[in-house]
Image: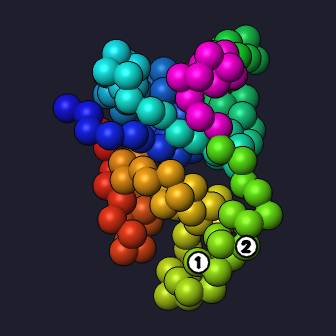
Amino acid sequence: MVSGPVFIDTWGWLALGHRKDPRHDEAAEYYRTLRSEGERVYTSDYVLDEVITLIFRRESFDEATRFVNGIIAAARMGYISVERITPERLAAAWDLRVRLKDKARISFTDLTSMIVMRECKVKHVLTEDRHFTQVGLGFQLVP
């Protein structure tokens, strides 16, 4: 079912953390499979910034806190690799932004995620965001 490392985008985390999300169960099952198969899971500090802001708008304070604490604990235990957007990655994302002038609706956070994915050789992304498949870098949406 899972083949290789996966990047979890903002949508993926929100589907996991918001139990009322229509695809919560599907995303949660996929994440459990990733963990049980020992697949490498990536995300970024930019993605988590978005997630933390949005999950506190969608869930109770206690539920949002529990969810974010779970992500932080998983990162500390090495289950999730939280990639930092360094000045070099920021510049590479900016270059991609300029190159993709026909795709102005792609968020800058998504562009930074694509740079991380390319560097870390990650082809699969847990998201509903079709922008990842529109840039010609070979990314595939999961589940």
Q: Amino acid at mark 2?
A: Ala
- Crowding around mark 1 (Cα neighbors within 10 Å: few <14, some 14 to 19, many 20+) is some
**What residue is disc 2 on?**
91
Q: Residue at x 69, y 63 (%)?
A: 89
Eyeballing the image, is 109 above or below 98? above
Classify mark 1: helix, strand or loop: helix
Q: Amino acid at mark 1?
A: Leu
Eyeballing the image, is 99 above or below 116? below
Quadrant (top left, top right, bottom left, bottom right) of the N terminus: top left
Mark positioned earlier in the residue sequence (2 or 1): 2
Q: Is residue 86 visible?
A: yes
Identify the image quadrant of residue 134.
Answer: bottom left
Mark seen at residue 96? 1
Q: Is there CB contact under 8 Å for labels 2 and 1?
A: no
- 129 within the magenta span: no
Q: Residue at x 50, y 88 (%)?
A: 102
How many numbered marks, from 0 up? 2
Q: Is residue 21 left or right of residue 75?
A: left
Q: Is residue 138 left or right of residue 77?
A: left
Closest to the observer: 18 or 28?
Answer: 28
Q: Residue at x 54, y 34 (%)?
A: 13
Residue reaching furthest right?
87
Classify mark 2: helix, strand or loop: helix
Bounds of the magenta segment: 71-82
Q: Is residue 67 visible?
A: no
Rounded to the nearest angstrom, the CA distance separating label 2 from label 1 is 9 Å
Mark seen at residue 18? none
